[in-house]
Amino acid sequence: MARIFCVANQKGGVGKTTTAINLAWAMATSGQKTLVVDLDPQCNATSGLGLKPAERHPLLVDAPLRESILSTAIDNLHLMPGCRSFQDVDRLAKTSTNQVSLLRRHLEVGLGLYDAVFIDCPPSLGELTQAALACSTEVLMPIQCEYYAMEGLTQMIHVIRDVMQQSPGRLTFGGILLTMVDPRFELTHEVDSEVRDFFGDIVFDTVIPRDIAISEAPSHGLSVLAYAPRSHGTRAYIELCMEVLDRD
Ligand SMILES: Nc1ncnc2c1ncn2[C@@H]1O[C@H](COP(=O)(O)OP(=O)(O)OP(=O)(O)O)[C@@H](O)[C@H]1O
Ligand SMILES: [Mg+2]
């Protein structure tokens, strides 16, 4: 069965989309058939992969899901594009939480061809994120190394625990990832040790450095792996990919 990663954190701008795109790209490069699902109406994962949002959200149109899946610049990596329509997003949230089943059924039955699926969530703990959690097998939570990093996390953990209790054995904590790490700042070291003290082994050894190449890549519709293959950012996302594959 596919590993389904829910990339979530209710805080905005912590590196969810960046991680979904670059880790998915690294997985695809390593031979895993990989899908990115853009659930965020900002559609950053869609544009970051150089593609256009859908007019209607693929999960709401009455057509086989496969028909909405787009190819990307590399083999093995596909995208279910996002949709900017807030009406669709509202409907999606409602439909999904009804039985959480819509997305899950599609992912399990229609999209069984993938080894790894990355769901890029919006910055909220709302129904869409909860539905995404409920259809996932692993939560992957990026945390930005900054002063408020830990604030609000207990709320997020509660929501994750609730989902875990609703279908025991399905969802696990895939890992916590420190992003935008800049070792020149004392604060970075403080947040790093605070997060590791609190969460222990589920924090990935790999950290993602702050790297300008990572922030430039999406404007070229590429992952940093293709945009700047020798950058620190590329090295970090490849290392993260190996760690994720090891944790299987
Ligand atoms: N390691 C990094 N180094 C430099 N810039 C980064 C890094 N990671 C992310 N960024 C930049 O930080 C901004 C926020 O990242 P991103 O969009 O991935 O966060 P997000 O959690 O998905 O945001 P949102 O909550 O709005 O969906 C983007 O401009 C991105 O290019
Ligand atoms: Mg995002």
Image: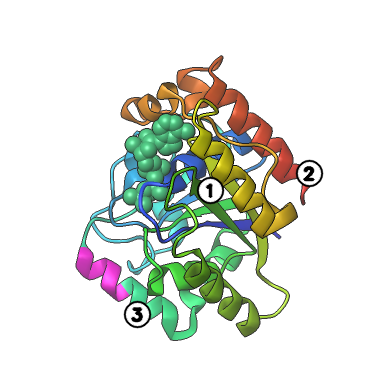
88 magenta-colored: yes
Please, what is the three-letter code of the amino acid marked with disc 2? Answer: Asp
> Crowding near pointer 3: few (<14 within 10 Å), some, many (20+)?
some
- Residue 115 visible in image: no
Q: Nearer the viewer, mark 1 or mark 2?
A: 2
> Crowding near pointer 1: few (<14 within 10 Å), some, many (20+)?
many
Q: Earlier in the sequence, mark 3 or mark 2?
A: 3
Q: Residue at x 43, y 50 (%)?
A: 69
Please, what is the three-letter code of the amino acid marked with disc 3? Answer: Lys
Distance from mark 2 CB to nearest ligand 1 atom below 8 Å: no
Q: How many marks?
A: 3
Render colour scheme: rainbow
Residue for badge 1:
35
Outermost residue to the top:
230
Q: CA distance from mark 3 to mark 2?
A: 36 Å
67 magenta-colored: no
Q: Earlier in the sequence, mark 1 or mark 2?
A: 1
Residue for badge 3:
94
Please, what is the three-letter code of the amino acid marked with disc 1? Answer: Leu
Residue for badge 2:
246
Q: Main secondary structure of the magenta part?
A: helix
Contact between marks 1 and 3 (CB within 8 A): the answer is no
Q: Is residue 135 left or right of residue 12?
A: right
Q: Is residue 205 left or right of residue 7?
A: right
SS type, badge 2: helix
- Residue 173 visible in image: yes
Q: Residue at x 55, y 28 (%)?
A: 183
